Amino acid sequence: MVNPCRRRFLAAAAAAAACELPLHAAAAPSYPDKPVRVIVPFPAGGTTDVVARLAMQKLGELTGQSFVVDNKGGANGVIGTELAARAAPDGYTLLMNTAGAQTLSPVLYKTSYEALGSFEPVSHLCDVRFVVIARKDLPAGSLQELIAMARQGKPLSASSGSSMISLITEQFKQVVEAPGIVNAQYKGTGPQMQAVVAGEVDFSFDSFTSVEMIRSGKVKALAVLLPQRAPAFPQVPTVGELGVPGMDFSSWSGLLAPKGTPQEIVNYLAQQMDRIMQMPDVLAKLAGYNYVPRRSTPQEFGRLIAADHERWKRIVKETGITLG
């Protein structure tokens, strides 16, 4: 009879061949032999948290070990990301992050981590686009009406729970020439969306985690930041249709490890994530949020992070946008 450790090693080797990673990159059969902490640098309920809990549940099932999501929100994702960067590079602390905290925050703020230099990329899991949501009793019934209110000097506020949402909000203020809109900061995209539901703010640029809130009428959708209308909301126009330029923004969620984590562990995790991102139930749940599933090698994910970081540096320099 093949012992469990040997069986796990053989399974890892088979997965390596299936996703064209080097066979010698399979992790040692002892990994993981204890629970793994997965830091999400935002509170529960936001985009990154949703993806993390879905993926880590499946990873736990595949490996027979617990991958425990640990929400460490604050400072637009900087607090949790810095915590992950300082963790021991042994594979037992991982980071599920978003493009904003990983590649934009180091441009906007003085962080103790680098976008790529402080981490080992593991896997790009999905891409995320945004929808403009407004409190249900906001007098504006369309994005054009909201813009008209702002230009008339009527007090309006927008919630931001990440560095990317903050930048999108500031860009919107510039594009529609409404500098008086208050950019209200929250500790994550979950609280950001709940602020609109509770009527604490007037609107927000939210990911499609708010899909059920929209369908239930707790908030209303004014526009989507997509090239085409979203299948989930075919009646909601794009910002382009409404004549609002310069709002082509998207984000991603992905798994990383502290710099120096053994490459065999990184590749082993990448192999498992590749399997997870082909599971029909995972794809169905991501589709429900209008998230676009992705599969990548660690090297491909690293190139994406580097390219995004350079893009944000260019955008911030060209627009002169500053936060807080």
Image: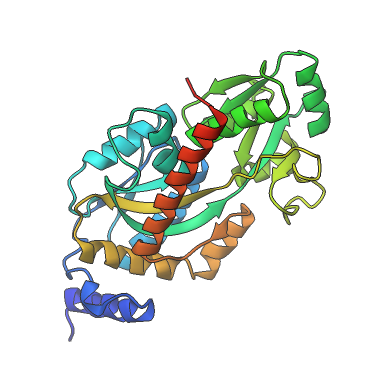
Residue depicted at 34% across the width and 65% down the height: 270
Which residue occupies the foreground of this view, 282 or 112? Answer: 112
Where is residue 159 drawn, in percent x and y?
Answer: 59, 26
For the N terminus, the quadrant is: bottom left
Asked which colour scheme the image uses, the reply is: rainbow
Rendering quarter of residue 80 = top left
Q: Is residue 277 above or below residue 239?
A: below
Residue at the outermost front position: 318
Position of 157 with respect to 114 (left or right) is: right
Q: Quadrant of residue 296?
A: bottom left
Q: Position of residue 300 (x, y in %)?
A: 40, 63
Q: Is residue 82 left or right of residue 290?
A: left
Q: Quadrant of residue 310?
A: top left
Above/below status of 298 relative to 67: below
Question: Is residue 89 visible to the viewer in this orientation of the structure?
Answer: yes
Residue at 20% across / 63% down in the picture? Answer: 31
Report x, y in % for residue 43. Answer: 44, 35
**Of 20 and 114, the residue lying toward us:** 114
**Whether residue 61 can be seen here:** no
